[in-house]
Amino acid sequence: MLSSVWSFIKRHKRKFIFAGAFVGGVYLLGKYAQAKIQELQEREAVEYISQARRQLHFESNQRTCNMTVLSMLPTLREAIMHHLHSESLTALLKSKPANKVEIWEDLKIISFTRSIVAVYSACMLVVLLRVQLNIIGGYLYLDNSVTKNGTTPLAPPEVQQQYLSSIQHLLGDGLISLITVVKKAVQEVVGPVSLKQGLSLQELEQHVVRVRQLVEDRCVSYNRRPLSWYMMPDEENTLAAQASGLTGNDITTIKLLNETRDMLDSPDFNTVLNTCLSRGFSRFLDNIAEFFQPSQGDSTHCSSPDGLSHVSLPLAKIIPIANGQIHSICSEIPSHFVQDLLMIDQVKEFAANVYETFSSHCDLHK
């Protein structure tokens, strides 16, 4: 029997060789596929953990952005009120001076100027800090990943401090320039309006829209740049200030500032800023609308859905209302105005795009 089996094997030797090779190949291929699948699963797990860690870091960074905005609003409010000090004029009016009308005219210009400047600068503060803190956040995420291998940090504390101190331009020279342009526009639009003239909400909105048009058109005309000019100094000024004895940290800071300027000059940034401004001025007018109430005897207007459109107030009564809006706009306690800006979807999406760009850019550390 053994001889017959052996004869059978000899007759079909080639088939057995091919069959063995095939089975062995399938086995090895299976082992290889199994190893590759395991490798892929491990890689996906690492990628998932990395993405989850990045998401947690991003969300933490956005909370930092919100808290930073709220903490800086009082400083912004004080700066605006310092340059547009209406309180001294209201104090003079209480003393019943002979030039009462002249003081009211000055108060009219200052009140509207500082409220409109407050809307502009608060919106700028929100979007500028979103850009800066997400750029820094992206660098810090890479630092946390890279410095474990002994690589030099991309954003050491000194660089962070220098870079974030550039916000002082918005609170200083940028704010002064913005006040100058807004005040001139207010003088042209609101200046000719009599203190006794009644204004409806719709008419008041038209005046505000006209002021905005003048401000934003002149910004482009004078500076050949959009509103971002008020948020950051020109690149030439920065380089001149840093021209003598640049350190490694100085060079890194200038690089960060230039990257920020690129972001501020991008179409996406301008779209987000315009969205914030539209929401901000809408909230500003909504706040003033609370003071436009139909008289109790006017039952027709009270019951009408658009009853407020028939209500008008003398400009002299609107002035103190507008004058006080800065305390709502630049409030460190989350107000409807600030919450509206912080919760805009376009702001969140833009922040996520900035963070993604700077937390996954492989060439940043080179």
Image: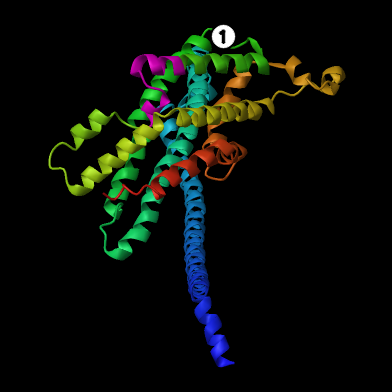
Question: Which residue is painted at 55% across and 36% down in the image?
Answer: 346
Q: Residues within 10 Å of mark 1 (few under 14, many from 20)?
A: some
Q: Is residue 55 above or below residue 324?
A: below
Q: Position of residue 272 (x, y in %)?
A: 51, 31
Q: Report whether 201 appears left or right of 262.
A: right
| Picture quadrant where residue 323 is located | top right
Q: Which residues are magenta?
A: 216-231
Q: Amino acid at mark 1?
A: Val
Q: Position of residue 41 (x, y in %)?
A: 52, 64
The kind of secondary structure the magenta stretch mainly shows is helix
Dot 1 lies on which element? loop
Give above or below for 287 relative to 309: below
Reading the image, the residue beneath label 1 is 193
Q: Position of residue 250 (x, y in %)?
A: 22, 44
Q: Is residue 87 visible?
A: no
- The residue drawn where x is 57% and y is 26% is 278
* Residue sitting nearer the eye, 330 or 83: 330
**Which residue shows up at 42% across the image and 40% down it?**
131
Q: Is residue 245 above or below residue 113?
A: below
What scheme was used to colour the molecule?
Answer: rainbow
Q: Is residue 228 magenta?
A: yes
**Residue that extends furthest to the bottom in the rendered view of this protein:** 1
Magenta region includes residue 79: no
Can residue 298 be seen here? The reply is: yes
Q: Is residue 6 left or right of residue 354?
A: right
